[in-house]
Image (cartoon, rainbow, N blue to C red):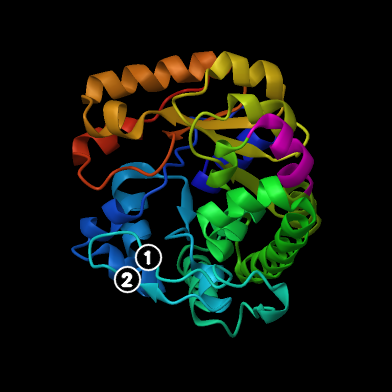
Amino acid sequence: MTPRERYFAVLRGQRPDILPRVPILMQFAAEYIGSNYGVFASDHRVLVEANLRCAADFGFDQLSAISDPYRETSRFGAPIEFPRDGVPICLKPPLEDDPDLAKLPRPDPLQAPRMLDRVQAIRAYRARTGERYSIMGWVEGPAAEAADLRGLANFFTDLLDDEEYVDRLMHRCVDTAIDFARAQVEAGADTIGIGDAVASQVSAATYESLILPAEKRLVDALHAMGARVRLHICGNITHLLPGIARLGVDLIDLDHFVDLPTARCILGPRIALAGHLDPVADVMRGTPAGIRAAVSAARVAANGPFLVGAGCEIPAPTPRENLRALCTPVAPA
């Protein structure tokens, strides 16, 4: 099977030759080719080269266009700083001092420089690899983007004090995410990742009443485009799983805090579970033998469709032999 074929086999409930490897790399990939995070996040040519080299050398099955949370935010008016060796920084959330939604533009993904840069990455992947790999685009989820626009403290206050405003704000965020995703799908992405990490910090009731409906509208729109959907919410999201089960996503990244059998019981037999290894304790600080054992244990615990990775980004200091161990071909359970 090609990498793309085995990835789609799992999503279709079929048996692949080996489990697909779908780790998320950013700073590691940049440094692997002798570059740095700042350039990786600001120049699609570096992002593409870094991920292609890592896919070839370590054995990945999916190429990713993820770099940082501020692609959309930058076009909404936020100034973004690019440290050489760190995650890009939003210097001023556009709605931090004034919540008026009328001041927000409707970003055009093919005109906004940072959004277009991601679209160009996907075009380059498709041009250079054809149908060999799965290609994953990325958008910010409604809660994450709303928090980026308002500032985290303001967003949490809004959730408590003004639910109607939060709903309108997230509606605007979903509109932009749909536009951005469509441009990426048209460029060649077969999967869109949704990053909505801030959702892990709210109660199940708040998630299901306010955030879930916005996420559901986004997921449904992505499926209507023909894309598969990968949900990424860092942290312990066990309390959110009953709601997430209603989203209809194709695969979900699960951090090491989440018990895999519990997740499978709640999410059902169809959804593919990905990740689960602790990126620091298991992958960065672990041993190759320990990593292979952890992957094998996770495969069994997942009790259904499973893709190999860590719960979040592979840390930059991870020894290369550890990443090779993570990507060692493993037969499905």
**Circle 1 SS class:** strand
Mark 1 and mark 2 in contact (Cβ < 8 Å)? Answer: yes
Above or below, 308 relative to 261: below
Please tell me whether residue 110 belongs to the stretch shown in magenta.
Answer: no
Q: Quadrant of residue 249?
A: top right
Residue 229, image x and y in percent?
A: 66, 47
Q: Foreground: 113 or 224?
A: 113
Mark 1 lies on residue: 89
Q: Residue at x 76, y 51 (%)?
A: 163
Q: Residue furthest bottom?
A: 111
Whether residue 188 is visible to the viewer of this picture, yes or no, is yes
Q: Amino acid at mark 1?
A: Ile
Res 175 → quadrant = bottom right
Residue at label 2?
A: 82
Q: Relative to 249, say whether 306 is above or below.
A: above
Amino acid type at mark 2: Phe
Stretch in magenta: 203-213
Any part of residue 269 in sight: no
Q: Nearer the viewer, residue 166 or 221?
A: 166
Magenta-drawn stretch contains 212: yes
Tag 2 secondary structure = loop
